[in-house]
Image (cartoon, rainbow, N blue to C red):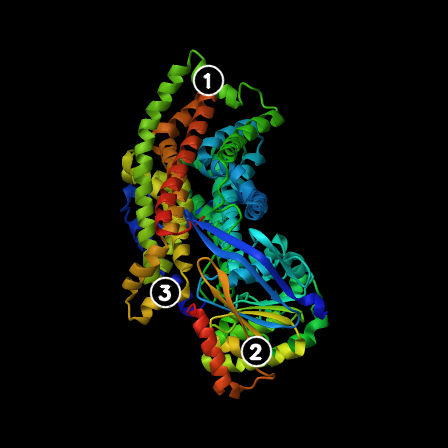
Amino acid sequence: MGIDLRRIYGSIRNLAIIVIVWEILGRLQLVASGALPPPSAVVLRLIKDWGDYPGHIGATIFGAGVGFIIGNAVAIAAGVLFALYPLTSRVARGLNIAIFALPAIAISPILVLTLSDPVPRIVLAAIGCYFVTMTATVVGLTQVDARSVDVVRAYGGGKWKALWLVQWRSALPVILSGLRVAAPNAVLGSILAEFGGGGRWGLGVYLLGSLGRAEPDRLWGIGLVATLIAAAAYAVFALIANSITGSSQSVTVPTSLLRSDEEGRVRPLWQRGALIASSIALPFALWWVLLLALRVPAMIAKTPAGLLDYLVLLPSAPIAQGKLVAALAQTLPMTFIGMAAGLALAFALALCSQLWPAVVRAFMPVALVTQTMPLVALTPLLVLMLGRGTAVILAITISVTFFPAFVTMAQGLLMVPRAALEVPKAYGASLFTQLRLVSIPSSLPYLFAATRLTAPRALLGVMIAEWLATGTGLGNLLNQSRGYLDYGMIWSVAFVSVVLSVLFYQVVVVVERRVLGRFGMASAQ
Amino acid sequence: MSTASGIRVETVSRVFAARGTTVEALRDVSLDCPAGSFTALIGPSGCGKSTILRLALGLDRADTGTIEVGGLAPSDATKSGITGVAFQDAALLPWRSVEDNIALPLDVLGRPRAAHSAKIAELIALVGLKGFENALPSELSGGMRQRVAIARSLVTDPQVLFLDEPFGALDQILRKQMNIELQRIWMESQATTLLVTHGIDEAVFLADRVVVMQSRPGRISKIIDIDLPRPRRAELFADPAFHKLEAEVASALDGH
């Protein structure tokens, strides 16, 4: 299903158009005076450099692959646990959000400081996968049609029977779409860890080494290879998901979703307080325990207490605070603007995917490229094109927020039940009316889910731009502190950026609950 | 099996709390369905008739009162495999074929499917789906899906059968056919049957007793015995005695 010759032909044609336009732009040096080399030059350079590649590709794929397997295995196991025992998900909530929100770039220096070579990339790749897949697993398992579960329960089947006979199979498309997003994330995580230092091999190392030498064709070659790896990983899971979704779409409109015992249950105040407290305490406890277990010297590795000293108690604390506040004043406004722009673009395009599927198919490769490219190869180009100012921060931020937001919202629109779409159609509604009456309202939960997803990523994007391009804000502070071996500040920036991301996330959650509650909708994870 | 397979509902109450308000789905409801009997529950939406069924299947728990199915607590009864159920919605698993959907209860109960292949084939023939064994639910019409659900409810040879508006989605003609079929199946199997329905004619045609319920709070307002001889045939739908009973049920529904 879904694979017919015309579609393949269309994709090839679109790709050809992009390549030809690019070639012309590059040949004539139209973009940023030669920073965009023509594809032919990139490919020639790639062939010339090919001897260097296998080692770097191997190292990146190894990190990404091992991280992908470990991260997803943990994620699926955790997802099953959270879905079957909702109480555990409430306790682990703080940890989950922290893992989701932590900007990879902020902790990569820390990982490199505390762990030896292949481990940081595996960890960052695994972290890149964990939240996406865990959430997909929980959603898939809980958003199952309650009636099917009732049938199993009516024959005395318990939680595990229902999981085995109904839930996992019906969750499979959702989990696969999670893996689809996780795959490029793993590649990205591995490359970001390579940025942070350590190791001799890896595309990130190669890129960083080539960044200083004004050779855009090599940079693009590296970016292209990284993108191809990410795209291939994405495509594999997209294909598998495609072949399965058709046979698991519910034929009738599910009137009710499976409700957990936890939902709608009002716990006494002290229990809720205890849950929230343990959910906040868990990440800190884990942070502390991990550092103890790894036996990292206290000079390098700051425990929560060490951080408190550095930021509040020591005589030098006011200076550190001042630096942080100044950096935040530069970073925060950019984060909000970039996020809003990225979301708006993604929502508009997701709606277009309903109206003009062909346009979206044509756009998809480009969207994929912006997913991996900007962090690696696009930055120098963007710097040359847009200067080292606000514009480049926004461009990078939009490109990292857009893709996950788009996937979430397009997925949401895809999940609108067939029958619900057919009702307005039966009254002769145009596609636009159908969109307005059914698709947009029912995608509201997904719009919020996308906002939750992108809020922390926006901060990541801004910090990457600040680190690599503009030399401002938190990103720069982190990079500088690396140079000065100011471990306290490295940990402080990492801590503050994680806390900020968690905060953004929480704000979105609160607004979401209010709005969706008013419309009587459940939130999409 | 006969004495042990009745359904006993004793002073059962169930209150649902939602969005600050409470709904009394059932208040002090008692009902005794002797082994081998056919009981129809009829009443307006929200009178708690489906709640009784869900309680008896162990899908929900009563606030007060007790329920026994075949002398066992509901969750034990379902686990022992003596019950069968068909819901208003077919609730078929979209990735399972007709055959595999019918076999689902066997998988839940951990019974070997090979031993039941003849039974499954027989049921497929019974509900008129021969040739569709390997079709997926999305390839079937609504009526066909519902018939798969009926076949599924019978695959365990249940001693107690729960039917929650199983024919609600079918057209009138098919529904009458299925009613006659169901009576035949029931007479053969001797299963204690509890049918939740909106159809007065269906209730009178099938049941030994029609239990009329009222809402807010959900309660039993009247029990009407149906003394029509069995097997009841299609002609019965046009019989004056049948109409008289229908009228009696209708006026009970109106609160008289």
**Residue A441 drawn above or below residue A309:** below
**Crowd class of label 3 (few under 14; some 14 to 19; many from 20; radius 10 Å):** some
Looking at the rendered structure, the secondary structure element under dot 2 is loop
For the point 32% across and 40% down, the residue is A338
- Disc number placed over residue B132 in the picture, else none: 2
Looking at the rendered structure, the secondary structure element under dot 3 is helix
**Residue A416 drawn above or below residue A520:** below
* Count of numbered marks: 3
Q: B83 or A143: which is nearer to us?
A: B83
Write down the chain letter for disc 2.
B
Write down the chain letter for disc 3.
A
Looking at the rendered structure, the secondary structure element under dot 1 is helix
Left or right of A190? Residue B66 is: right
Left or right of B4? Residue A333 is: left
Residue type at tag 2: Phe
For the point 29% across and 59% down, the residue is A436
- Disc number placed over residue A421 in the picture, else none: 3
Percent of width and height locating residue A515: 34, 46
- According to the picture, the residue beneath numbered tag 1 turns out to be A310
Percent of width and height locating residue A205: 49, 36
